Image: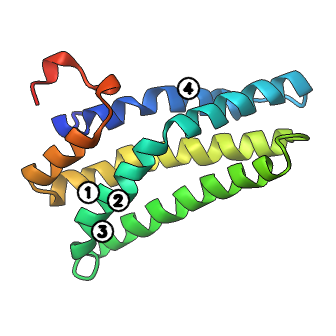
Amino acid sequence: MKRANQLQPLSRQHHLGLNLSRHAKECTDEPEEIAKHWLNLSSYISDMQHHFQIEDNLIAHALEPYRVSHSDVASVLDTLDGQHKQLHKLMDTVEKSGGKDVTVAQVKELGNLLYDHIRFEERELYPTVEKYLTEAELDTVYAASPDSIKRADENR
C-alpha cells in the first residue's frame, strides 16, 4: 500500500515489529524461548517510545478537532489510545515483577497486542491521517520522525 511520503518512516518501523510479534505468537512453553521472545518484544517496544510519542502527541492532537464531527476519527483515536495503554500495561506488569517468571501466555498476549496494533495503524490510523491532516501537519510528523529511519532519497 502506498503511504504518504511523510508517514513512510513511521510505517517502515513496523516491519520488524510484525516479524517479532508473529514469531512470539508461536512461542513454546520453554524458558529459553519465553525469555528470548519477551526480550525481543520488550526491546522493540522500548525502542519505539519516540514513535508512540509522535502518534500520541502530534498525530492524535492534529486529528482531535475532527473527533466530534467525524465518527471514524473518534473511533481511530479511541482505538489508538486504548491499544497504547494495553501495551504499556502489560509491559509494566511484567517489569514490576522484575521481569521474572514471564509466562508463555504473556509473551503470546504481547505478540498479539503488538501485531494487532501495527495492523490497526497501517489499515486504519494512517489512512485516516492521510485523509484529514494537511501537508504542513504531515511535514511536522515527518520532521519529528527519527533521522535513523528516514531515507536520503525521500527529499522531504
Amino acid of disc 4: Asn
Residue at 14 percent of width and 17 percent of height: 153
- Residue 137 lies, in percent from the top left, at 15, 53
Q: Earlier in the sequence, mark 3 or mark 1?
A: 3
Mark 1–mark 2 distance (CA, rounded to whole Å): 16 Å
Q: Quadrant of the C terminus?
A: top left
Q: Earlier in the sequence, mark 4 or mark 2?
A: 4
Amino acid of disc 3: Val
What residue does disc 4 label?
19
What residue does disc 1 label?
128
Quadrant assignment, res 41: top right
Amino acid of disc 1: Thr
Q: Earlier in the sequence, mark 4 or mark 1?
A: 4
Q: Mark 3 Cα within 10 Å, few/some/many (few <14, many 20+)?
A: many
Residue at 34 percent of width and 59 percent of height: 57
Tag on residue 80? none
Secondary element at tag 3: helix
